Every structure is written in structure tokens, then in C-alpha cells.
Amino acid sequence: MTEAKLLQQLQCGEESALEALIRRYSAYVVAVIHSRGRGILTAEDEEELASDVFLALWDGADAIRGETLRPWLAQVAVYKTVDRLRRHKISLPMTDSTAVAPDTVGEALEQQEDVLALRKALCSLSDEDREIFRRFYALDQTADQIASGMSLPAATVRTRLRRGRKKLKLLLEEQASGGS
């Protein structure tokens, strides 16, 4: 059954639709929670948070717009994970990108410009390719995990990552040389 049909049934209060969505997306939601929690949370905490995500899906189904639930589920999973960590005063270890502070205001501005340029370049990718990049780089999923979660062949995911990186590199080089 299509995701849109399941969402429509869920909005009508059909529990079987929720059960089908849980079966379809529970591994994805737990992976998002685990990735965002950086392995600090226990498996029980992750399962509890996943249950909270699906409860939010049940309670908020009427407000969900769009054809795909993945972005909505990921956003709620990240929010609930961060909230849980905050409530328990758990601090995440610094990532490599946050460990290096710029020495000057100029360096900080350059970093901000680089981030804006990357965001602009990412917008040139298709929605599906952006989702692949988000899962790979933000959620630390492997190509196989992405393929499974998005119902794509793993080779397709790897190809799209490779082509996307090439496209982004060209766009960023053009922006750096003043071409855009």
C-alpha cells in the first residue's frame, strides 16, 4: 500500500495504518534516534523515543501535509532525541566541525559564507538526492541503509552520491570564481 494511502487511513483513525507505518519505518526512526544520540542513549531509550515518535504520528496525523512521511518522522525523531538529552542534561561530545573554533572574525565569516554556498548548491539537487545526502552525511547512514529505507538499489544510492558530489563540487567552484 502506498504511503499516501496509509497516511489517509491514519488520518481517518485506522489503527492498522499506524501498525503498517510502524513496520515500515521503525528501523528508520530508531536509526535517526541512534545517530542523533551519538550512541549515548540505551537501546531501551531509543525504543521508547521511537514509540513517542509514532505516538506523535498518531496524534498529529491530521496536520501532516505532503506525500512522504520520512522527513516528518526524521524531524520528530531528532526533536524528541534532543529533548530527551536536554532533559537528562546529557551533553553530546563535540564533533570535529565544532571542535575547531575560528581564530578571527574574518575566518568565522568565511566559514559562514562557505555554509551558505553549500546550502545554495544543495538546493540544486533533486528532493530525492538531497534526502540521500541528508541521510548519508547528517544521519551517518550507509548506502545500504539508505537504499533499504528509500526502496532503492544500493548501487543507485552510491551513484547518486558520487554524481551529487561532482555536481556540488562544480557548483561550489563556480560560486568561488564568481560564476553564479
Image (cartoon, rainbow, N blue to C red):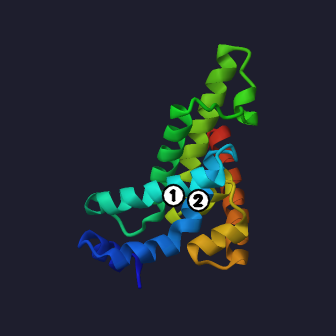
- x, y percentage for residue 2? 41, 81
Q: Gap between marks 2 and 1, in whole Å?
A: 6 Å
Picture quadrant of residue 135: bottom right
Is label 1 in a helix, a strand or a loop?
helix
Is label 2 in a helix, a strand or a loop?
helix
- x, y percentage for residue 57? 37, 60
In the drawing, does residue 1 fall left or right of residue 104? left
Q: Is residue 64 above or below residue 24?
A: above
Q: Residue furthest top?
A: 104
* Residue type at numbered disc 2: Val
In this rendering, does residue 177 appear at all?
no
At 41% from the left edge and 85% from the top edge, which residue is drawn? Answer: 1
- x, y percentage for residue 137? 67, 52
Residues at marks 2 and 1 touching, judged by CB atoms closer than 8 Å: yes
Label 2 crowd bin: few (<14), some (14–19), many (20+), radius 10 Å: many
Residue 42 badge:
none
Which quadrant is home to the C terminus? top right
In the foreground, 117 or 62: 62
Labels in figure, total: 2
- x, y percentage for residue 44? 60, 54
In the drawing, does residue 69 fall left or right of residue 26? left
In the drawing, does residue 119 fall left or right of residue 19? right
In the foreground, 157 or 35: 35
Label 1 crowd bin: few (<14), some (14–19), many (20+), radius 10 Å: many
At 48% from the left edge and 46% from the top edge, which residue is drawn? Answer: 80
At 38% from the left edge and 72% from the top edge, which residue is drawn? Answer: 18
Which one is earlier in the sequence, the residue at label 2 or at label 1?
2
* Residue type at numbered disc 1: Ala
Q: Is residue 115 above or below residue 57?
A: above
Residue 50 badge:
1
Q: Residue furthest front?
A: 44
Residue 30 badge:
2
